[in-house]
Image (cartoon, rainbow, N blue to C red):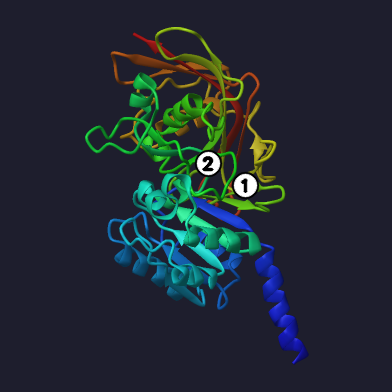
């Protein structure tokens, strides 16, 4: 009897110690144990975790829920996974019985699709429903909340990106409003914000793969003076995650995965040069890869101990110039250019260009106050992970 009581207490303590988020950039591989397994671990562990699955963002929520349930239970050993049947048309997010079902879970996972569906269902016009309140209460009690793609983009308390491309964002600016299917490249955001789990940071997803660096910077800059605007955001690459621990005390984010990284942008000290065109300097940018961490209160970064400073160990003589730096069609153009830039011996400043013209954009990288790091991940000796911090970015429209 005494052992049973001790075991139960241990589970409760572990559960109460979580209060964590797992934000995934989308296209999450079924075999990515580092991420799926972490969600199960934080929700209580194999054979214990009870995962509430929200597929509210999906166009086919029941089918999507079956996919996630199968993975959590049959591959990663959760005790059970339960579909929380809230959709944009179900009108049950204030149903006490659904809220009670939600409170029976030790972890939650929000699937991909369209993040605007999640907001319409769970937090219409910035008002918490009973089901969302239940998730927040469980998170404060020690549950974990994960999400991928749209399911990660909706987790913050800041304005929420709803659509658009980097090039259109720089050309026309970012606008408050929903996604417009007639103008899919128009950069838009929801002024009522996301679900409110993470304070002060704007997340974006499918990041390096779709060239979303400039779109994140533009939304931060254009919405910073909104009631729930912010000057700081991060972009999550596909099959990568930012694990946020100690959410309500001193939140720290740690990068999980080996495929890419997490882009950090801060426009706090950006200088906007008055003109009729896009012209601003001094955006502070970092790119973190596996095991790097960031203090989400101070913004201080700690590079993984297995990485070494690239200074005086660079491989290339000069920085390469990209003539398609804003590409949303070619994989990882900006990320690759930045990695090569920090791995060159001679050039501390380089200017890249957009492929698009009328207008054409110049994107300047300045590493004078920055530093790059590289190393072989202990979990994957076949790749080299490259991180950098304090890259200064300037964006200028050249008509």
- Does label 2 or label 1 sit earlier along the sequence? 1
Local crowd size for mark 1, using a 10 Å CA cut-off: few (<14), some (14–19), many (≥20): many
Q: Position of residue 176 (x, y in %)?
A: 39, 31
Q: Position of residue 299 (x, y in %)?
A: 66, 36
Residue at 47 percent across and 55 percent down: it is 147
How many callouts does the rendering have?
2
Residue at 68 percent across and 66 percent down: it is 16
**Disc 2: which residue:** 262
Query: Residue 316 versus residue 21: which sits nearer the camera?
Result: 21
Q: Secondary structure at mark 2?
A: strand
Mark carried by residue 164: none
Q: Position of residue 358 (x, y in %)?
A: 28, 13
Look at the picture and state if 2 lies above or below 364.
Answer: below
State the quadrant of the C terminus. Answer: top left
Residue at 65 percent across and 64 percent down: it is 141
State the quadrant of the N terminus. Answer: bottom right
Look at the picture and state if 63 lies above or below 9.
Answer: above
Image marks 2 and 1: residues in contact by CB distance under 8 Å: yes
Residue at 65 percent across and 41 percent down: it is 296
Look at the picture and state if 310 lies above or below 384.
Answer: above
Residue 393 visible, this angle: yes
Residue 347 visible, this angle: no
Local crowd size for mark 2, using a 10 Å CA cut-off: few (<14), some (14–19), many (≥20): many
> What is the spatial separation of the Cα atoms under label 2 and label 1, in whole angstroms?
10 Å
Mark carried by residue 253: 1
């Amino acid at each position: 009897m005494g052992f049973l009581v001790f075991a139960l207490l241990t589970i409760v303590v572990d559960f109460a110690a979580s209060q964590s988020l797992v934000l995934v950039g989308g296209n999450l591989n079924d075999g990515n144990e580092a991420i799926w397994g972490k969600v199960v671990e934080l929700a209580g562990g194999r054979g214990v975790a009870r995962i509430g699955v929200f597929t509210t963002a999906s166009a086919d929520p029941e089918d999507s829920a079956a996919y996630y349930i199968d993975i959590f239970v049959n591959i990663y050993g959760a005790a059970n996974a339960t579909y929380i049947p809230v959709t944009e048309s179900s009108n049950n997010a204030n149903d006490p019985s659904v809220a009670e079902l939600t409170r029976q879970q030790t972890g939650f996972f929000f699937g991909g699709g369209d993040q605007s569906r999640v907001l319409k269902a769970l937090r219409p016009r910035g008002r918490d429903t009973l089901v969302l309140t239940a998730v927040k209460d469980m998170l404060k009690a020690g549950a974990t909340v994960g999400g991928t793609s749209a399911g990660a983009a909706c987790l913050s308390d800041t304005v929420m990106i709803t659509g658009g491309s980097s090039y259109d964002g720089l050309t026309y600016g970012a606008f408050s409003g929903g996604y417009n299917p007639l103008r899919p490249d128009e950069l838009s955001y929801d002024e009522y914000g996301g679900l409110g789990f993470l304070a002060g940071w704007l997340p974006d997803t499918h990041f390096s793969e779709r060239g979303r660096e400039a779109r994140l910077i533009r939304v931060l800059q254009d919405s910073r003076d909104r009631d729930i605007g912010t000057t700081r955001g991060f972009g999550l690459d596909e099959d990568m995650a930012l694990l946020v621990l100690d959410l309500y005390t001193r939140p720290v984010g740690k990068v999980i995965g080996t495929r890419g990284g997490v882009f950090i942008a801060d426009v706090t000290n950006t200088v906007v040069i008055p003109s009729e065109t896009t012209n601003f300097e001094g955006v502070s940018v970092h790119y973190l890869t596996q095991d790097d961490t960031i203090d989400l209160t101070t913004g201080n970064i700690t590079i993984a101990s297995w990485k070494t400073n690239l200074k005086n160990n660079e491989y290339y003589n000069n920085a390469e110039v990209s003539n398609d730096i804003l590409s949303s069609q070619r994989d990882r153009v900006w990320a690759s250019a930045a990695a090569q830039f920090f791995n060159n011996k001679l050039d501390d400043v380089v200017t890249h260009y957009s492929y698009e013209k009328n207008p054409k954009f110049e994107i300047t990288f300045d590493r004078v106050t920055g530093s790059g790091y590289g190393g072989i991940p202990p979990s994957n000796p076949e790749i080299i992970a490259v991180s950098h911090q304090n890259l200064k970015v300037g964006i200028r429209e050249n008509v």
